[in-house]
Image (cartoon, rainbow, N blue to C red):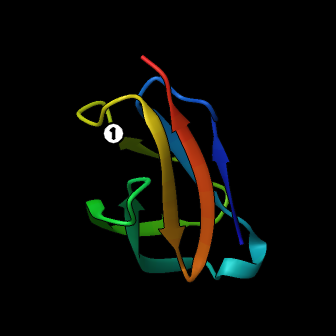
Amino acid sequence: QWLIKPNPTNGIIYVLPTANSGIQNKKILKILDSNGLEVYSEELTLYNGTWNSINLQNLKSGLYILILDNEARKIVIEK
């Protein structure tokens, strides 16, 4: 379980793991474009109660799918 903000975003997003995620976890974050192609991937070390910033400013405006810990969320980048 995790939270993401803001959505829509201008390219910087913040990910917050919830209490069920464990105290410290290494996770692979993937971003897919609307065609299902992977456009971003990063290994994150997530800590409960700590927002982690992700810079996606190199991506174009549009709809993307963020996958983290087998959970998928839609995000919108607006520039």
Q: Residue furthest top?
A: 79
Q: Amino acid at mark 1?
A: Leu
Q: Residue at x 33, y 39 (%)?
A: 56
Count up the numbered dots: 1
In the rendered image, the quadrant that contains the N terminus is bottom right
Identity of the residue drawn at 38% across and 59% down: 35
The residue singled out by tag 1 in the image is 56
Is residue 63 shown left or right of residue 37? right
In the depicted structure, whether residue 35 falls above or below residue 8? below
Q: Nearer the viewer, residue 57 or 33?
A: 33
Which element carries disc 1, helix, strand or loop?
loop
Q: Residue at the spot x=42%, y=16% of the render?
A: 79
| Residue at figure coordinates x 46%, y 23% from the top left | 10
On screen, 39 above or below 24? above
Q: Is residue 8 left or right of residue 54?
A: right
- Residue 14 horizontal/vertical position (percent): 54, 43
* x then y, percent, for residue 59: 29, 37
- Rendered image quadrant of residue 29: bottom left
Q: Is residue 68 left or right of residue 8?
A: left
Q: Residues within 10 Å of mark 1 (few under 14, many from 20)?
A: some
Residue 55 horizontal side relative to residue 25, left or right? left
Residue 51 is at least partly visible in this image: no
